[in-house]
Amino acid sequence: MIVGRFGMTSVASVCVFCGSRVGNDSRYVEAARALGHGIASRGMRLVFGAGSIGLMGVVADAAAEAGGEVVGIIPEFLRRLEVGRTESDQFIVTDSMHSRKQRMFEMSDAFISLPGGLGTLDETFEIITWRQLKLHHKPIVIWDVAGYWKPLVGLVDATIQNGFSAPENRELFTMAETLDEVFSALVPTSDAAPVEDSTRL
Ligand code: AMP
């Protein structure tokens, strides 16, 4: 996180959660490419799961092609399965999924979810629930490419309607329809924890 002259902060390092497959609608790949390019062209660092397959690989390739800094973080046991993208600027190998997620969290000022499968759901919900527990106040943006995440919003709304979740939990993350909306939502929240000069590792 970068701290400006008046204590304002901006996102310098962004983590993208997304599928290890590309899905069956070309708009998913187009969005992943645009996001990777957009992150790099705004001077932000990309943190991702270090796989070269699926949307993960598309985002990372696009960011690297646009001259951006790319950090991949992968647990040892997934290196072969997810074809570790070793040409990233930093290729970090962890001993477990837990340490991978912790490292991704620590190295990122904000989180963006693209379409993906169960792993993406897990990562997205973990970071949302950590925010619910006030373990962090970092922005979380879900890019609803081609309406892919509508059922997820319906499920969150159902938890609220049925009394299992506080209405304000709907504010823990932002739904974005377009790439511009994604980047507009990457604003550090007013309830942010005390800022440091730099939290980049
Ligand atoms: P998927 O969305 O299932 O294609 O997975 C996308 C990424 O999520 C992959 O890099 C997985 O390694 C990662 N992931 C994180 N947590 C999990 C989990 N609990 N189960 C499966 N994959 C996970």
Image (tube, rainbow, N blue to C red):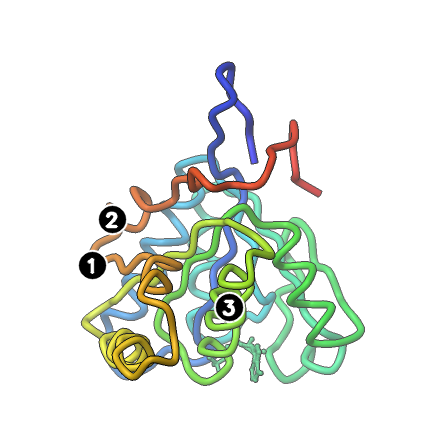
Q: Residue furthest top?
A: 5
Position of the N terminus by quadrant:
top right
- Binning the other alpha carbons within 10 Å of mark 2 as few (below 14), some (14 to 19) or many (20 upward) gives some
**Residue 186 rendering spot, x and y as whole percentages:** 38, 44
Q: What amino acid is found at the position of numbered circle 3 in the picture?
A: Thr
Q: Is residue 32 left or right of residue 139?
A: left
**Residue 198 rendering spot, x and y as whole percentages:** 65, 32
Residue drawn 42% across the image and 45% down it: 39
**Above or below for 34 versus 82:** above
Disc 2 CB within 8 Å of nearest ligand 1 atom: no
Residue drawn 54% across the image and 44% down it: 13
- Circles 2 and 1: CB distance less than 8 Å? yes
Q: Disc 2 marks which residue?
A: 181
Instruction: Tell me the CA gap for discs 2 and 1.
Output: 6 Å
Q: What amino acid is found at the position of numbered circle 2 in the picture?
A: Glu
**Sequence-first disc among 1 and 3:** 3
Given residues 11 and 80, the one toward you in this image is 11
**Above or below for 148 versus 184:** below
- Binning the other alpha carbons within 10 Å of mark 1 as few (below 14), some (14 to 19) or many (20 upward) gives some
Q: Quadrant of residue 74?
A: bottom right
Q: Quadrant of residue 32?
A: bottom left
Instruction: Tell me the CA gap for discs 2 and 3.
Output: 22 Å
